[in-house]
Image (cartoon, helix red, strand yellow):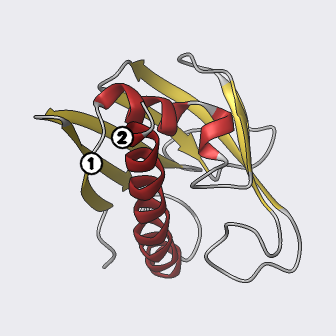
């Protein structure tokens, strides 16, 4: 049986405000996670994350992949969540999408970032394969985020 959630936690040598901007501003998301990002940063806001062949995807892509996103919670600079991977044009629900939650906690001059992705058992797809792929992806992308936010903090 597949676990219901995937959790990653890292400490970033940057204040929460810098990490918050990096995980919520589309222009910055495109510097560590996807190749492009668009969304309305408010509860219910819709958007998308885009990966191109040869870009930031952790798998080899043969064609551009556009993943719909629906923002759920926005509580700066502490908590941000969205649903994704639901069919384009459909409302994101527990049955057709995964939930991603970012929680930022100050630790001195640094920020502890917790990312929890859940709902793998609820979607009608190969949950084990999807969870394995997302787990590897988060490992790579969060390390890129750590480097990006730390570098940005040193420039201030």
**Residue 134 coordinates in the image, percent (x, y):** 49, 69
Which residue is farthest front? Answer: 155
Label total for image = 2
**Residue 58 coordinates in the image, percent (x, y):** 61, 76
Q: Which residue is drawn at 60% across and 44% down?
A: 29
Q: In this view, does 45 lie to the left or right of 113?
A: right
Occupied quadrant, residue 77: top left
Which residue is farthest right? Answer: 63
Q: In this view, does 104 lie to the left or right of 90?
A: left
Q: Is residue 1 above or below residue 3?
A: below
**Residue 124 coordinates in the image, percent (x, y):** 58, 64
Circle 2 — which element? strand
**Circle on res. 97:** none
Q: Distance between the residues labelled 1 and 2?
A: 6 Å
Which residue is farthest left? Answer: 108
Q: In this view, does 70 lie above or below 4?
A: above
**Circle on res. 102:** 2
Q: Nearer the viewer, residue 119 or 32?
A: 32
Q: Is residue 17 left or right of residue 103?
A: right
The first of marks 1 and 2 along the sequence is 2
| Mark 2 Cα shell of 10 Å, populated few (<14), some (14-19), many (≥20) | many
**Circle on res. 114:** 1
Label 2 near label 1: C-beta < 8 Å? yes
**Residue 76 coordinates in the image, percent (x, y):** 37, 18
């Amino acid at each position: 049986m597949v676990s219901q959630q995937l959790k990653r936690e890292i400490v970033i040598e940057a204040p929460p405000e810098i990490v918050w901007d990096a995980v919520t501003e589309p222009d910055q998301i495109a510097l560590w996670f996807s190749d492009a990002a668009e969304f309305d940063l408010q509860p219910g806001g819709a958007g998308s994350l885009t990966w191109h062949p040869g870009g930031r995807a952790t798998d080899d892509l043969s064609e551009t992949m556009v993943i719909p996103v629906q923002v759920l919670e926005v509580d700066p600079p502490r908590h941000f969540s969205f649903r994704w991977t639901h069919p384009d044009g459909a409302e994101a629900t527990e049955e057709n999408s995964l939930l991603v939650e970012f929680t930022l906690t100050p630790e001195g001059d640094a920020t502890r970032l917790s990312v929890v992705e859940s709902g793998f058992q609820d979607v009608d797809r190969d949950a084990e394969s999807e969870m394995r792929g997302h787990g590897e992806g988060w490992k790579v992308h969060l390390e890129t985020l750590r480097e990006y936010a730390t570098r940005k903090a040193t420039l201030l």
